[in-house]
Image (cartoon, rainbow, N blue to C red):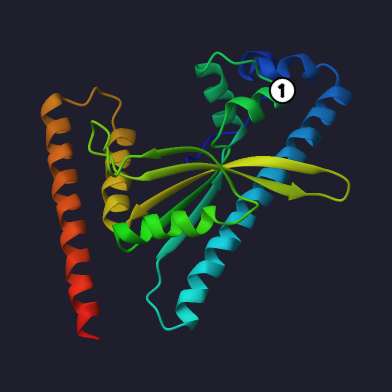
């Protein structure tokens, strides 16, 4: 979701390209082969992401046609850029290979699911994991146990098969489930950190956490109001 400058001048390629590509630049055939492999791999990740997005969309439409309230407000998707993938592998001190990408990174393909209420998050989680072709790999519940910063969200890493003409690939996709209020806080908090290169003062950190706790209280109160109104129907 970050914009990156991808322009590289031919005269300084060895100084600007990551080590992952440097050896192949001098051999056009190798570089072309590597580029094609990367493109095919990204296609597989995008396919896995779209499969899960379609499942979520169907679950939401089912509620709509049955006259029930939608559990999903919006779904956002993204594929990591090559720069981001390389940077994360280097940060983890992992080799810069395609195999390493698949084994060590769980968030190359990502979905962010925005729900009206907290209960919707867990309902969507449970319904999605009932699908026989969705395997739960990892779960981190930052709603029940928020991060020190105040960040709240439910993170899932799931694996789903992608069927091509001759092969099957089991692909991992990260899913973040948040309420509208949680997404509001997380988006602005990220924006504040992204806009400054200076270290965030402790006083600002405390204020951000206080705001997160207030928003969490609002989340709970809005859900209580919604439940009360449902009982009136």
Q: Is residue 187 left or right of residue 213?
A: right
Q: Residue at x 64, y 26 (%)?
A: 103
Report the residue marked by disc 1. Answer: 10
Is 71 placed above or below 211 here? below
Q: Nearer the viewer, residue 95 or 8?
A: 95
Q: Position of residue 86 (x, y in %)?
A: 59, 24
Q: Is residue 167 left or right of residue 192?
A: right
Q: Nearer the viewer, residue 106 or 13?
A: 106
In which quadrant is the C terminus drawn?
Answer: bottom left
- Give residue 32's quadrant in the image: top right
Q: Nearer the viewer, residue 98 or 193?
A: 98
Q: Position of residue 83 (x, y in %)?
A: 58, 29
Q: Position of residue 47 (x, y in %)?
A: 68, 51
Q: Position of residue 44 (x, y in %)?
A: 72, 45
Q: Is residue 32 left or right of residue 14?
A: right
Is 20 placed above or below 152 here? above
Q: Residue at x 79, y 19 (%)?
A: 24
Secondary element at tag 1: helix
- For label 1, the crowd category at 10 Å Cα-Cα, with few meaning under 14, some 14 to 19 and many 20 or more, is few
Badge count:
1
Q: Residue at x 66, y 19 (%)?
A: 96
- Give residue 228's quadrant in the image: bottom left
Is 223 placed above or below 52 here? below
């Amino acid at each position: 979701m970050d914009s990156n400058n991808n322009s590289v001048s031919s005269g300084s390629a060895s100084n600007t390209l990551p080590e992952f590509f440097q050896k192949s630049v001098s051999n056009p055939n190798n570089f072309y082969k590597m580029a094609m492999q990367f493109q095919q791999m990204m296609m597989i990740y995008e396919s896995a992401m779209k499969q899960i997005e379609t499942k979520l969309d169907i679950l939401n439409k089912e509620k709509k046609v049955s006259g029930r309230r939608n559990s999903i407000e919006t779904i956002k998707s993204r594929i990591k850029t090559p720069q981001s993938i390389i940077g994360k592998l280097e940060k983890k001190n992992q080799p810069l290979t395609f195999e390493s990408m698949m084994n060590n990174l769980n968030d190359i393909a990502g979905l962010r699911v925005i729900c009206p209420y907290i209960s919707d998050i867990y309902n969507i989680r449970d319904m999605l994991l009932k699908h026989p072709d969705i395997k739960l790999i990892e779960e981190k519940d930052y709603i029940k146990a928020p991060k020190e910063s105040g960040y709240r969200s439910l993170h899932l890493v799931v694996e789903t098969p992608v069927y091509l003409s001759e092969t099957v690939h089991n692909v991992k996709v990260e899913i973040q489930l948040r309420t509208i209020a949680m997404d509001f806080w997380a988006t602005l908090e990220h924006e504040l950190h992204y806009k400054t290169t200076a270290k965030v003062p402790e006083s600002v950190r405390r204020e951000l956490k206080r705001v997160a706790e207030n928003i969490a209280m609002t989340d709970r109160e809005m859900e209580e109001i919604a439940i009360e109104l449902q009982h009136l129907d």
